[in-house]
Image: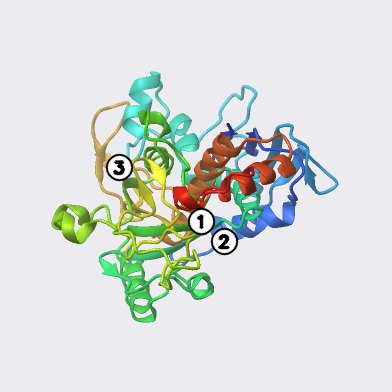
Amino acid sequence: MIKYITAGESHGKGLTIIVEGFPTGFPLSEDYIQEDLARRQRGYGRGGRQLIEKDRAELLSGVRHGLTMGSPISMFIPNKDYVNWGKVMATEPVEDPGNTVTRLRAGHADMPGTIKYGISDVRNILERSSARETAARVAAGAVAKRFLQEFGIEVHSHVINIGGVRSKYEHPVDWEKANASEVHCIDPLAEAEMIKIIDKAKEDGDTIGGAVEVVATNVPIGLGSHVHYERKLDARLALALMSIQACKSVAIGEGWEAADLPGSQYHDTLEPIAEDGKAPAGPYPTASGPWHRATNRTGGIEGGMSTGMPLIARFTIKPIATLAKPLPSVDLVTGKTVQAHFERSDVCNVPPAGVIGEAAVAFVLADAFLEKFGGDNIDETSRNFNSYQKTIGPRSWVATDG
Protein backbone atom coordinates (compact mmCIF):
# COMPACT_ATOMS: atom_id res chain seq x y z
CA MET A 1 0.00 0.00 0.00
CA ILE A 2 2.82 2.40 0.87
CA LYS A 3 6.49 2.34 0.03
CA TYR A 4 9.62 4.43 0.21
CA ILE A 5 12.92 4.61 -1.62
CA THR A 6 16.13 6.32 -0.60
CA ALA A 7 19.12 7.53 -2.62
CA GLY A 8 22.45 9.06 -1.71
CA GLU A 9 25.91 8.25 -0.41
CA SER A 10 27.60 8.76 2.94
CA HIS A 11 29.83 11.61 1.72
CA GLY A 12 27.76 12.69 -1.29
CA LYS A 13 25.66 15.82 -1.59
CA GLY A 14 22.89 14.37 0.54
CA LEU A 15 20.11 11.85 0.93
CA THR A 16 16.89 11.83 -1.06
CA ILE A 17 13.72 10.14 0.18
CA ILE A 18 10.47 9.50 -1.69
CA VAL A 19 7.49 8.19 0.26
CA GLU A 20 4.38 7.12 -1.63
CA GLY A 21 0.89 5.87 -0.81
CA PHE A 22 -0.22 7.81 2.26
CA PRO A 23 -3.70 9.36 2.26
CA THR A 24 -4.31 13.07 2.08
CA GLY A 25 -5.21 15.28 5.00
CA PHE A 26 -3.06 14.41 8.01
CA PRO A 27 -0.60 16.93 9.52
CA LEU A 28 3.10 16.65 8.71
CA SER A 29 5.92 19.15 9.22
CA GLU A 30 9.69 19.38 8.90
CA ASP A 31 9.89 20.08 12.64
CA TYR A 32 8.13 16.80 13.43
CA ILE A 33 10.48 14.80 11.19
CA GLN A 34 13.50 16.60 12.63
CA GLU A 35 12.73 15.35 16.14
CA ASP A 36 13.53 11.75 15.18
CA LEU A 37 16.49 12.79 13.02
CA ALA A 38 17.96 14.54 16.08
CA ARG A 39 17.33 11.49 18.27
CA ARG A 40 19.15 9.31 15.74
CA GLN A 41 22.26 11.49 16.07
CA ARG A 42 22.40 11.25 19.85
CA GLY A 43 23.75 8.42 21.97
CA TYR A 44 26.89 7.56 23.89
CA GLY A 45 29.53 6.12 21.61
CA ARG A 46 28.78 8.17 18.51
CA GLY A 47 31.68 9.45 16.41
CA GLY A 48 32.78 12.84 15.13
CA ARG A 49 30.41 12.80 12.13
CA GLN A 50 27.52 13.65 14.45
CA LEU A 51 29.27 16.89 15.44
CA ILE A 52 29.32 17.95 11.80
CA GLU A 53 25.87 16.92 10.58
CA LYS A 54 22.75 18.48 12.08
CA ASP A 55 20.24 16.59 10.02
CA ARG A 56 17.05 18.23 8.85
CA ALA A 57 14.83 16.92 6.09
CA GLU A 58 13.50 19.52 3.67
CA LEU A 59 10.02 18.67 2.43
CA LEU A 60 10.06 19.16 -1.34
CA SER A 61 6.65 17.82 -2.32
CA GLY A 62 3.52 16.04 -1.12
CA VAL A 63 2.67 18.46 1.70
CA ARG A 64 0.71 21.70 1.36
CA HIS A 65 -0.18 24.09 4.16
CA GLY A 66 0.91 21.52 6.74
CA LEU A 67 -1.23 18.65 5.43
CA THR A 68 -0.38 15.67 3.22
CA MET A 69 -1.71 15.91 -0.34
CA GLY A 70 -1.94 12.21 -1.22
CA SER A 71 0.83 12.64 -3.77
CA PRO A 72 4.41 11.33 -3.30
CA ILE A 73 6.22 12.99 -0.41
CA SER A 74 9.82 13.82 -1.29
CA MET A 75 12.49 15.01 1.12
CA PHE A 76 16.17 15.95 1.00
CA ILE A 77 18.72 15.75 3.80
CA PRO A 78 21.94 17.58 2.86
CA ASN A 79 25.33 16.22 3.94
CA LYS A 80 27.14 19.21 5.41
CA ASP A 81 30.44 17.33 5.25
CA TYR A 82 30.18 17.22 1.45
CA VAL A 83 32.27 20.42 1.26
CA ASN A 84 35.27 18.31 2.29
CA TRP A 85 34.50 15.51 -0.15
CA GLY A 86 33.50 17.42 -3.29
CA LYS A 87 36.36 16.09 -5.41
CA VAL A 88 36.25 12.52 -4.09
CA MET A 89 32.48 12.28 -4.58
CA ALA A 90 32.11 14.47 -7.66
CA THR A 91 29.42 13.33 -10.09
CA GLU A 92 31.40 14.58 -13.10
CA PRO A 93 34.74 13.07 -14.19
CA VAL A 94 37.84 14.41 -12.39
CA GLU A 95 41.49 13.87 -13.24
CA ASP A 96 42.59 12.63 -9.81
CA PRO A 97 39.74 12.06 -7.32
CA GLY A 98 42.10 10.64 -4.67
CA ASN A 99 41.06 8.68 -1.58
CA THR A 100 40.81 5.34 -3.41
CA VAL A 101 40.11 2.52 -0.96
CA THR A 102 41.46 -0.99 -1.57
CA ARG A 103 41.94 -2.31 1.98
CA LEU A 104 38.98 -4.56 2.78
CA ARG A 105 37.15 -4.61 6.13
CA ALA A 106 35.80 -7.80 7.61
CA GLY A 107 32.14 -7.47 8.54
CA HIS A 108 31.37 -4.75 5.98
CA ALA A 109 30.03 -4.90 2.41
CA ASP A 110 33.53 -4.25 1.01
CA MET A 111 34.61 -7.64 -0.34
CA PRO A 112 31.32 -9.11 -1.62
CA GLY A 113 30.29 -5.72 -3.05
CA THR A 114 33.47 -5.11 -5.04
CA ILE A 115 33.47 -8.67 -6.38
CA LYS A 116 29.76 -8.59 -7.26
CA TYR A 117 29.96 -5.27 -9.13
CA GLY A 118 33.41 -5.83 -10.65
CA ILE A 119 35.11 -2.69 -9.31
CA SER A 120 38.54 -1.95 -7.82
CA ASP A 121 37.67 0.94 -5.49
CA VAL A 122 35.84 -0.05 -2.32
CA ARG A 123 34.50 3.50 -1.98
CA ASN A 124 31.79 2.75 -4.54
CA ILE A 125 30.48 0.14 -2.09
CA LEU A 126 31.14 1.66 1.33
CA GLU A 127 29.50 4.98 0.47
CA ARG A 128 26.07 3.46 -0.12
CA SER A 129 26.31 0.60 2.37
CA SER A 130 27.17 3.06 5.15
CA ALA A 131 24.69 3.49 7.99
CA ARG A 132 24.46 7.14 6.97
CA GLU A 133 21.58 5.91 4.79
CA THR A 134 19.54 5.28 7.93
CA ALA A 135 18.92 9.01 8.29
CA ALA A 136 16.74 8.69 5.20
CA ARG A 137 14.92 5.70 6.69
CA VAL A 138 14.22 7.65 9.87
CA ALA A 139 12.72 10.49 7.82
CA ALA A 140 10.47 8.02 5.97
CA GLY A 141 9.55 6.36 9.25
CA ALA A 142 8.62 9.70 10.78
CA VAL A 143 5.92 10.10 8.13
CA ALA A 144 4.55 6.69 9.11
CA LYS A 145 4.70 7.49 12.83
CA ARG A 146 2.80 10.71 12.27
CA PHE A 147 0.11 8.84 10.34
CA LEU A 148 -0.21 6.15 13.03
CA GLN A 149 -0.63 8.79 15.73
CA GLU A 150 -3.91 9.77 14.09
CA PHE A 151 -5.20 6.39 15.33
CA GLY A 152 -3.55 6.41 18.74
CA ILE A 153 -0.70 4.07 17.76
CA GLU A 154 2.65 4.98 19.31
CA VAL A 155 6.05 3.45 18.51
CA HIS A 156 8.98 3.66 20.96
CA SER A 157 12.25 1.87 21.69
CA HIS A 158 14.87 1.27 24.37
CA VAL A 159 18.24 -0.44 24.58
CA ILE A 160 18.17 -3.81 26.36
CA ASN A 161 21.78 -4.93 25.92
CA ILE A 162 25.17 -3.42 25.14
CA GLY A 163 28.21 -5.64 25.14
CA GLY A 164 26.52 -8.28 27.29
CA VAL A 165 25.21 -5.84 29.91
CA ARG A 166 21.45 -6.44 30.04
CA SER A 167 18.86 -3.93 31.17
CA LYS A 168 16.33 -4.93 33.83
CA TYR A 169 12.90 -3.54 32.96
CA GLU A 170 9.19 -4.23 33.00
CA HIS A 171 6.35 -3.25 30.70
CA PRO A 172 4.98 -0.68 30.34
CA VAL A 173 8.31 1.08 29.80
CA ASP A 174 8.93 4.66 30.92
CA TRP A 175 9.75 6.18 27.53
CA GLU A 176 10.73 9.58 28.91
CA LYS A 177 13.31 7.84 31.08
CA ALA A 178 14.64 5.93 28.09
CA ASN A 179 14.94 9.06 25.96
CA ALA A 180 16.77 10.88 28.77
CA SER A 181 19.43 8.17 29.01
CA GLU A 182 22.74 8.58 27.17
CA VAL A 183 22.47 4.99 26.00
CA HIS A 184 18.66 4.96 25.67
CA CYS A 185 18.35 2.50 28.57
CA ILE A 186 15.82 2.75 31.43
CA ASP A 187 17.94 0.78 33.92
CA PRO A 188 20.40 3.23 35.58
CA LEU A 189 22.68 0.48 36.88
CA ALA A 190 22.91 -1.12 33.45
CA GLU A 191 23.38 2.31 31.87
CA ALA A 192 26.47 2.97 34.00
CA GLU A 193 27.98 -0.40 33.06
CA MET A 194 27.15 0.10 29.38
CA ILE A 195 28.99 3.43 29.37
CA LYS A 196 32.04 1.78 30.95
CA ILE A 197 32.05 -0.91 28.27
CA ILE A 198 31.81 1.71 25.49
CA ASP A 199 34.65 3.71 27.06
CA LYS A 200 36.81 0.58 27.26
CA ALA A 201 36.11 -0.28 23.63
CA LYS A 202 37.07 3.26 22.57
CA GLU A 203 40.27 3.06 24.61
CA ASP A 204 41.14 -0.25 22.95
CA GLY A 205 40.34 1.00 19.44
CA ASP A 206 37.49 -1.51 19.36
CA THR A 207 33.71 -1.41 18.79
CA ILE A 208 30.74 -2.85 20.66
CA GLY A 209 27.26 -4.10 19.72
CA GLY A 210 24.02 -4.84 21.55
CA ALA A 211 20.25 -5.23 21.29
CA VAL A 212 17.18 -3.00 21.11
CA GLU A 213 13.49 -3.52 21.83
CA VAL A 214 10.82 -1.66 19.83
CA VAL A 215 7.29 -1.45 21.25
CA ALA A 216 4.14 -0.31 19.42
CA THR A 217 1.04 0.26 21.56
CA ASN A 218 -2.66 0.45 20.61
CA VAL A 219 -2.13 -1.69 17.50
CA PRO A 220 -5.60 -2.99 16.49
CA ILE A 221 -6.40 -6.67 16.11
CA GLY A 222 -6.02 -8.10 12.62
CA LEU A 223 -3.18 -6.28 10.88
CA GLY A 224 -1.36 -8.65 8.56
CA SER A 225 -2.72 -12.03 7.45
CA HIS A 226 -2.21 -15.75 7.87
CA VAL A 227 -2.97 -16.70 4.27
CA HIS A 228 0.36 -16.01 2.48
CA TYR A 229 3.97 -15.74 3.63
CA GLU A 230 4.51 -12.17 2.40
CA ARG A 231 1.39 -10.89 4.19
CA LYS A 232 2.37 -12.15 7.64
CA LEU A 233 3.00 -9.17 9.90
CA ASP A 234 5.90 -10.75 11.76
CA ALA A 235 7.59 -11.72 8.48
CA ARG A 236 7.28 -8.16 7.22
CA LEU A 237 8.69 -6.78 10.46
CA ALA A 238 11.59 -9.22 10.36
CA LEU A 239 12.48 -8.10 6.83
CA ALA A 240 12.31 -4.41 7.71
CA LEU A 241 14.44 -4.78 10.85
CA MET A 242 16.95 -7.23 9.37
CA SER A 243 17.62 -4.79 6.52
CA ILE A 244 19.01 -2.23 8.99
CA GLN A 245 22.76 -1.97 8.62
CA ALA A 246 24.61 -4.18 11.18
CA CYS A 247 21.44 -6.02 12.28
CA LYS A 248 22.13 -9.74 12.69
CA SER A 249 19.00 -11.17 14.36
CA VAL A 250 15.34 -10.33 14.95
CA ALA A 251 12.82 -11.69 17.46
CA ILE A 252 9.13 -10.96 17.93
CA GLY A 253 8.26 -10.78 21.64
CA GLU A 254 10.22 -13.36 23.61
CA GLY A 255 11.16 -15.14 20.41
CA TRP A 256 14.68 -16.01 21.52
CA GLU A 257 13.36 -17.45 24.80
CA ALA A 258 10.71 -19.58 23.06
CA ALA A 259 13.30 -22.30 22.50
CA ASP A 260 13.67 -22.75 26.27
CA LEU A 261 10.02 -22.92 27.37
CA PRO A 262 7.25 -25.54 27.12
CA GLY A 263 4.02 -24.46 25.49
CA SER A 264 2.23 -24.32 28.84
CA GLN A 265 4.55 -21.52 29.92
CA TYR A 266 5.04 -19.70 26.63
CA HIS A 267 1.62 -19.04 25.09
CA ASP A 268 -0.43 -15.96 26.00
CA THR A 269 -3.66 -17.25 27.49
CA LEU A 270 -6.85 -15.23 27.02
CA GLU A 271 -8.45 -13.85 30.16
CA PRO A 272 -12.21 -13.95 30.88
CA ILE A 273 -14.25 -11.05 29.56
CA ALA A 274 -15.73 -8.78 32.22
CA GLU A 275 -19.49 -8.28 32.40
CA ASP A 276 -19.08 -4.66 31.33
CA GLY A 277 -17.25 -5.81 28.20
CA LYS A 278 -14.01 -4.09 29.21
CA ALA A 279 -10.62 -5.73 29.45
CA PRO A 280 -9.45 -6.69 32.94
CA ALA A 281 -6.78 -4.55 34.54
CA GLY A 282 -3.25 -5.58 33.65
CA PRO A 283 0.25 -4.25 32.91
CA TYR A 284 -0.23 -4.20 29.16
CA PRO A 285 -2.10 -1.36 27.43
CA THR A 286 -4.29 -2.90 24.77
CA ALA A 287 -6.27 -1.88 21.71
CA SER A 288 -8.21 -5.14 21.73
CA GLY A 289 -11.37 -3.99 23.48
CA PRO A 290 -12.65 -6.83 25.69
CA TRP A 291 -9.94 -9.28 24.63
CA HIS A 292 -6.93 -9.47 26.92
CA ARG A 293 -3.94 -11.74 27.56
CA ALA A 294 -2.33 -12.71 30.84
CA THR A 295 1.10 -12.35 29.21
CA ASN A 296 2.55 -11.03 25.98
CA ARG A 297 5.38 -13.40 25.16
CA THR A 298 4.38 -13.64 21.50
CA GLY A 299 4.88 -9.90 21.16
CA GLY A 300 1.37 -9.07 20.01
CA ILE A 301 1.36 -11.32 16.92
CA GLU A 302 -0.24 -14.73 16.35
CA GLY A 303 -0.53 -16.46 12.99
CA GLY A 304 1.01 -13.47 11.23
CA MET A 305 -1.67 -11.09 12.59
CA SER A 306 -1.70 -8.51 15.37
CA THR A 307 -3.57 -9.54 18.54
CA GLY A 308 -4.28 -6.10 19.98
CA MET A 309 -1.60 -6.48 22.64
CA PRO A 310 1.51 -4.28 22.38
CA LEU A 311 3.63 -5.27 19.43
CA ILE A 312 7.17 -6.04 20.62
CA ALA A 313 10.16 -6.62 18.35
CA ARG A 314 13.78 -7.05 19.37
CA PHE A 315 16.87 -6.97 17.20
CA THR A 316 20.61 -7.20 17.67
CA ILE A 317 23.27 -4.91 16.25
CA LYS A 318 26.73 -6.36 15.67
CA PRO A 319 29.86 -4.36 16.54
CA ILE A 320 30.72 -1.78 13.87
CA ALA A 321 33.11 -3.12 11.22
CA THR A 322 35.33 -0.02 11.11
CA LEU A 323 37.80 -0.23 14.01
CA ALA A 324 40.22 2.49 15.12
CA LYS A 325 42.71 -0.33 15.68
CA PRO A 326 42.08 -2.14 12.37
CA LEU A 327 41.93 -5.89 12.02
CA PRO A 328 44.36 -7.65 9.66
CA SER A 329 42.98 -7.96 6.15
CA VAL A 330 43.86 -8.26 2.48
CA ASP A 331 44.30 -5.60 -0.20
CA LEU A 332 41.71 -5.84 -2.99
CA VAL A 333 44.21 -5.08 -5.76
CA THR A 334 47.45 -6.74 -4.60
CA GLY A 335 45.99 -9.61 -2.56
CA LYS A 336 48.64 -8.97 0.10
CA THR A 337 48.17 -8.70 3.87
CA VAL A 338 47.31 -5.19 5.10
CA GLN A 339 45.53 -3.51 7.96
CA ALA A 340 41.82 -2.98 7.23
CA HIS A 341 40.68 0.44 6.06
CA PHE A 342 39.73 2.96 8.76
CA GLU A 343 37.53 5.99 8.25
CA ARG A 344 35.88 8.11 10.91
CA SER A 345 33.49 5.82 12.78
CA ASP A 346 31.35 5.33 15.87
CA VAL A 347 32.39 3.07 18.74
CA CYS A 348 28.81 1.97 19.47
CA ASN A 349 25.70 2.62 17.39
CA VAL A 350 23.21 0.65 19.48
CA PRO A 351 21.40 3.68 21.07
CA PRO A 352 20.55 5.31 17.71
CA ALA A 353 19.61 1.91 16.29
CA GLY A 354 16.44 2.12 18.38
CA VAL A 355 15.26 5.18 16.46
CA ILE A 356 15.95 3.40 13.18
CA GLY A 357 14.07 0.36 14.45
CA GLU A 358 11.10 2.56 15.35
CA ALA A 359 11.07 3.87 11.79
CA ALA A 360 11.16 0.33 10.36
CA VAL A 361 8.34 -0.91 12.60
CA ALA A 362 6.21 2.19 12.04
CA PHE A 363 6.43 1.88 8.26
CA VAL A 364 5.40 -1.79 8.32
CA LEU A 365 2.49 -1.02 10.65
CA ALA A 366 1.33 1.93 8.54
CA ASP A 367 1.45 -0.26 5.44
CA ALA A 368 -0.55 -3.03 7.14
CA PHE A 369 -2.99 -0.48 8.57
CA LEU A 370 -3.76 1.01 5.16
CA GLU A 371 -3.93 -2.48 3.68
CA LYS A 372 -6.66 -3.26 6.20
CA PHE A 373 -8.58 0.04 6.29
CA GLY A 374 -7.73 1.83 3.04
CA GLY A 375 -8.81 5.36 2.30
CA ASP A 376 -7.60 8.13 0.01
CA ASN A 377 -8.39 10.74 2.66
CA ILE A 378 -7.56 10.44 6.35
CA ASP A 379 -11.26 10.93 7.19
CA GLU A 380 -12.19 7.95 5.03
CA THR A 381 -9.53 5.83 6.73
CA SER A 382 -10.85 6.92 10.14
CA ARG A 383 -14.42 5.94 9.25
CA ASN A 384 -13.31 2.52 8.11
CA PHE A 385 -11.21 2.00 11.22
CA ASN A 386 -13.93 3.15 13.63
CA SER A 387 -16.50 0.92 11.94
CA TYR A 388 -14.21 -2.09 12.27
CA GLN A 389 -13.51 -1.39 15.93
CA LYS A 390 -17.21 -1.83 16.66
CA THR A 391 -17.00 -5.44 15.47
CA ILE A 392 -14.12 -6.78 17.54
CA GLY A 393 -16.07 -8.06 20.55
CA PRO A 394 -17.31 -11.64 21.02
CA ARG A 395 -19.48 -12.70 18.12
CA SER A 396 -22.71 -12.43 20.12
CA TRP A 397 -21.77 -8.83 21.01
CA VAL A 398 -20.93 -7.66 17.52
CA ALA A 399 -22.99 -4.70 16.43
CA THR A 400 -25.31 -5.47 13.49
CA ASP A 401 -26.50 -1.96 12.76
CA GLY A 402 -23.36 -1.03 10.78
Label 1 sits on a secondary structure element that is helix
Question: Which residue is at 50% across, 76% downward?
Answer: 177
Q: Would you name the residue on which mark 1 appears?
A: 355
Residue at x 54%, y 73% (from the top left corner): 176
Q: Residues within 10 Å of mark 3 (few under 14, many from 20)?
A: few
Q: Quadrant of residue 61?
A: top right
Q: Residue 166, image x and y in percent?
A: 29, 69
- Looking at the rendered image, the quarter that the N terminus falls into is top right
> Mark 1 to mark 3: distance in Å?
23 Å
The residue under label 3 is 107
| CA distance separating discs 1 and 2 | 7 Å
Sequence-first tag of 1 and 3: 3
Residues 228 and 121: in front is: 228
30, 65: nearer the viewer: 65
Q: Is residue 251 above or below residue 194?
A: above
Q: Which residue is mark 2?
A: 39
Left of 353 or right of it: where is 382?
right
Residue sitting at x 43%, y 68%: 274
* Mark 3: amino acid: Gly
Tell me which label, 3 or 2, sits earlier in the chain: 2
> Quick check: marks 1 and 2 in contact, CB under 8 Å?
yes
Considering only order in the chain, which callout, 2 or 1, is on the residue closer to the N terminus?
Answer: 2
